[in-house]
Amino acid sequence: MRSIAPRLSLIAVTLTLACKSPESGETMTAATTEASTSTATTTLNLTDATTDLTTSTTTVTGTTGPTTTEEAGTATGTGTEGTSTTEGLTCIPIQCEGAVLACGDCMDNDGDGKVDLADPECVSPCDDREDTFATGLPGDNMDPCNQDCFFDGNSGAGDDKCDWSLKCDPASPGGDICPYDPDFKNCPEMQSQECVDSCQVPNGCDCFGCCTVEVDGMTYDIFLGDPDCSLGDIASCQLCTKNDDCDQECHPEECEICFGETEPPPGCEDPTCEGYDSCTVDMMGNSNCAEGYYCSTGCCFPIQPG
């Protein structure tokens, strides 16, 4: 279902960086033995990723400061192959249209001990909430019924040719705002090929944000568009019915990491990933994906510019 992203081998990084909260007034520093330098941010274009006063958005007016590396330490390509391990890596904030959002700021914004993409509730680095699966982006999911690709990195509708209405789902994930309508006529059984090819769906989800998670030995199909849904409060999540035409099933028996997990299944040393390079994330949000990519369900996905 997915197109294969290009691969580019990166050279291993030797980097020591202290990442401190801007609230403490401390700064980020790096020390090495050689003099070549690189900047510590990645600038992205993301539609509608503006500051939300209810979330922990940090507006960035420049770079977070220079980072020095050894002469052979850094590669600047955009392929999917990164380092073979996260050991020794340091979290680098990611800019989304000039702002560093909660899931890309190298901070534990919800106090659960997990930073950025190590937090299951962070679907991508350009989400602005760590405490729930909702993106926190102004304008996202403004239409309570009509859905496009949940993982397209923007809050617009229709640009990826994915089309679905929550009125079609008997589980009624739209709640009272958009209840299930058994007589609703626009419930296509098939999505366009463009939708199937372009929507970067994590293992265990369909393209409209209906994902299977396991909590305390129980499995649930939850709607990520629910503003209150989190793994820590699974009872608050709206349930949903997956769209079979664009459902990316997870196969833990093949060492795939399923949605809501960050570690390979028991007995698997490394994750596998169909169509993309595999990756891991440590508790500080570091991954071994290349610049311009992020790690989700063990796969290096290109960051969607929106």
Image: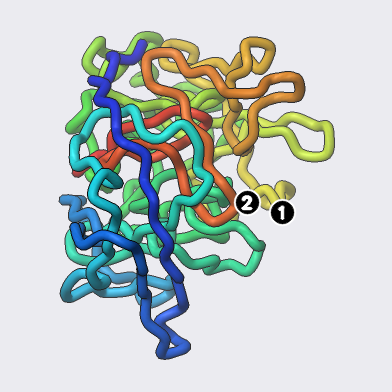
Amino acid of disc 1? Asp
Q: Is 199 drawn above or below residue 115 in the view shown?
A: above
> Which residue bears the numbered disc 2?
230
Disc 1 crowd rating (10 Å Cα; few below 14, some 14-19, many 20+) is: few
Residue 19 falls in image quadrant: bottom left
Q: Regarding mark 1 in the picture, which secondary structure is present there?
A: helix
Q: Is 80 drawn above or below residue 122 in the view shown?
A: above
Residue 256 falls in image quadrant: top right
Q: Regarding mark 2 in the picture, which secondary structure is present there?
A: loop
Q: Residue furthest bottom?
A: 25
The reply to whether residue 58 is in sight is yes
Q: How many marks?
A: 2
Q: Residue at x 41, y 90 (%)?
A: 25
Q: Residue at x 46, y 34 (%)?
A: 209
Does residue 185 appear left or right of residue 280 in this picture? Answer: left
Amino acid of disc 2? Ser
- In space, the residues marked 2 and 1 are separated at their CA atoms by 5 Å
Q: Residue at x 71, y 54 (%)?
A: 233
| Quadrant containing the C terminus in the rendered view | top left
Q: Residue furthest right?
A: 217
Q: Residue at x 27, y 48 (%)?
A: 155
Nearer to the camera, 296 or 246: 296
Nearer to the camera, 178 or 107: 107
Residue 1 falls in image quadrant: top left
Q: Is 67 drawn above or below residue 84 in the view shown?
A: below
> Which residue bears the numbered disc 1?
233
Callout 2 touching callout 1 (CB < 8 Å): yes
Measured from the top left, where is residue 162 in percent x and y?
29, 25
Measured from the top left, where is residue 104 in percent x and y?
38, 57
Disc 2 crowd rating (10 Å Cα; few below 14, some 14-19, many 20+) is: many
Measured from the top left, where is residue 43 in percent x and y?
18, 55
The reply to whether residue 146 is in sight is no
